[in-house]
Image: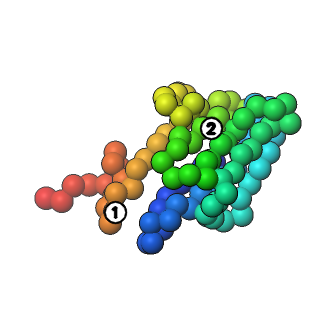
Amino acid sequence: MILSIAADTEGCLRVKFQLYDSSGHAVAESDEASSFPAGVRVHSEEGELLLDLPAKIGENILYRLYNRKGELLTSSDGVSTRIGPCLRMESWPRGGVPQGSRQPRPA
């Protein structure tokens, strides 16, 4: 898991991340899913913005997510998102199975 953003039962956003730079070096990690009321901004040693989670709800989240090999998985400038070919995304509906899941359908 590189980045996870989810709402808890009270509707508060919880964020968990483990961020790498373009060389595959670990840059920042949150120990558990946490709220960041003041926002959070993470840069690589080279100054590249890896995550900008604003304090204000409704503002755009910016990110560049790399894997341990330094391959860019996805990036967002807050308006559009680019998804790399090796990234898999799933959404978990409330009380359901993720879309695209290979779970059999009921007969």
Q: Say how the picture is coloured.
A: rainbow
Q: Would you say 92 lies left or right of 82 here?
A: left
Q: Residues within 10 Å of mark 2 (few under 14, many from 20)?
A: many
Percent position (x, y) of residue 17? 66, 53
Residue 1 showing in the rendered view? no
Q: Check disc 1 and report its element: helix, strand or loop.
A: loop
Q: Give the residue furthest to the front.
A: 56
* Residue at the limit of the structure toward the bottom, as seen here: 10
Please state the horizontal and vertical placement of residue 21, each as a whole percent of the image.
Answer: 76, 36
Amino acid type at image mark 1: Arg
**Along the line of sight, the residue nearer the viewer: 9 or 88:** 9
Q: Residue at x 71, y 46 (%)?
A: 41
Depicted 70 relative to depicted 19: above or below: above
| Disc on res. 94 | 1
Residue 52 in the image: x percent, y percent? 65, 43
Residue sitting at x 51%, y 53% = 57
- In the picture, the disc for residue 56 is none
- Residue sitting farthest toward the right: 45
Closer to the camera in the image, 54 or 34: 54
In the image, residue 93 lies at what x, y percent? 34, 57
In screen coordinates, is 80 left or right of 46? left
The residue drawn where x is 44% and y is 72% is 9
Identify the element where label 2 is drawn: strand
Q: Is residue 107 above or below residue 53?
A: below
Give the labeled residue for mark 2.
63
**Mark closest to the chain's N terminus, 1 or 2:** 2
